Amino acid sequence: MDHPSNGRRKFLRSSALAAAFLGIAPDQLSRAAIEAKLDLLTSTPAARGKSVMGLKKAPIEQVKVGMIGLGNRGSFHAKLVHALYPKAKLTAICDIRPEYAQKTADFLKENGQNPAVYTGKEDAWKEMVRRDDIDLVIVVTPWENHVPMCVEAMRQGKHVATEVPAAVTLAEHWEMVDTAEEMQLNCMMMENVCYGDEELWLLNMAEQGVLGTLTYGECAYIHNLRDSMLSKIGYYNQWRIRHHISTDGNLYPTHGLGPVAQYMGIGRGDRFDHLVSMSSLQASLTEASQSIEPDNEFYNRTDFVHGDMNTSLIKTDKGRLIQVHHDVVTPRPYNRINALAGTKGYHEGYPSRLSILGKEEHAWLPDEAYQSYRDKYKHPIWERLKAEIEKNGGHGGMDFVMMYRLIDNLHQGKPLDMDVYDAADWSGVTPISAISVQLGSAPVQFPDFTRGHWQKERSLGIQEFV
């Protein structure tokens, strides 16, 4: 059987378009030049520090938090941090828009906190992260700002947690990993779906062998955001739709992929080996742009490059297959799929259904039998925090569970549930899928962000919750 790299070379399309995407000068265009550039992009650079797997730091009696970005998502995160007072305290907040910063400041002051406020200029956040009374910086800004903010905060001695995706380009992914290793600090991507009730239940079943040997997973981010992306008031400076002009690939993989990666022990005994990606034609945004207000920057645009649907296939080192979909522009109902197949069982989400070998022939388990599995394998954190989850919520409660674990682990001096390597692996699908699409759906190797440490099997921190 051919090695994946041979398959890549077999299907590699040596074209001017691919060369331009990879930054190769026209007079240097050749198959060898494209392959050399691709190998360089996906290679592993020399380490600048030691691994931060299982990083333990001294317990923090009160986790002092600085937050950058106070829009809809950031303002809600601020409320979750406040809900954990006095274990956590917001000492400083920042947003370029004064009205957003003030709104969160007013809420906190009404509830007994008095954070310093930074606003009004693009680099106000740099002043904030230099403060010596911040332990953790939470970044809730447009994607392209995540790595610059996380890196600067780590260089100022702060742990960081960033919204998804953690990074955009492969160079940014390595900068994030290298800085965390150099500074020996936590850098966590805040993938809230990994804390969902259904996802933690399925993780329990997977780890306890209920589904047998795992072979296949399918996941997605299918969420119609067309109107909000085109709206002049939906996203700050309409930042999200700009990625649909610059990149054709899987722009937002982590909500679906994070849980599946945890089920399969990615970075904990298995790893993403290579990926193949392809996109459909682009039609929805062009058609929708014809009916918005003429003074909108995106009125009647025809230069969107991201296909309406992107599908990527990932092969792992152990031979497992993961299918990842991205569609944020068609009328399809919201779906993350959350499918997991093993030799003894199969689960599929939206709605959640379960099939167990020998229980029902060619059918899903009936409601009573399904519920018995839900009750038996329900993750204990959802029972322990039931009252607080109901009070604080956030996507059904997963947001609160995520923030609780982030703050509580720093408070206790325990390793965080997700590390910088998880962030790089899951977010790395975006640039790697874009390369594959540009190369005619050629297989592209995944960089090893762990530098070989993935081979050591280790438990997930959330599974050690007592």
Image (spheres, rainbow, N blue to C red):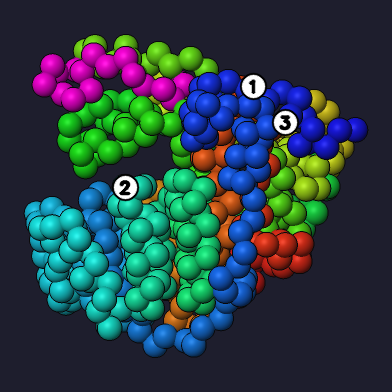
Taking the image as drawn, is residue 42 in sight?
yes
Query: Percent x, y for residue 384?
Result: 52, 69
Amino acid carrying label 3: it is Arg
Which residue is pictured at 31% across the width and 33% down the height?
Answer: 242
Query: Percent x, y for residue 199?
Result: 58, 50
Residue range corresponding to the magenta coloring: 292-309
Query: Percent x, y for residue 205?
Result: 72, 53
Circle 1 SS class: loop
Between the residue at mark 1 and the residue at mark 3, the CA separation in whole angstroms equals 9 Å
Between the residue at mark 2 and the residue at mark 3, the CA separation in whole angstroms equals 33 Å
Does the stretch in magenta take in 55? no
- The crowding category of the residue bearing disc 1, from other C-alpha atoms within 10 Å (few below 14, some 14 to 19, many at least 20), is some
Name the residue that disc number 2 marks: 142
Q: Earlier in the sequence, mark 2 or mark 1?
A: 1
From the image, state whether disc 2 or disc 1 is nearer to you. Answer: 1
Name the residue that disc number 1 marks: 13
Q: Are marks 2 and 3 in contact (CB under 8 Å)?
A: no
Which residue is pictured at 57% across the width and 74% down the height?
Answer: 49
Q: Is residue 202 left or right of residue 136?
A: right
Q: Earlier in the sequence, mark 1 or mark 3?
A: 3
Which residue is pictured at 71% across the width and 52% down the height?
Answer: 271
Residue 207 image-quadrant placement: bottom right
Residue 8 image-quadrant placement: top right
Up-down relation of residue 413 to residue 312 (above or below): below
Q: Is residue 294 left or right of residue 334?
A: left
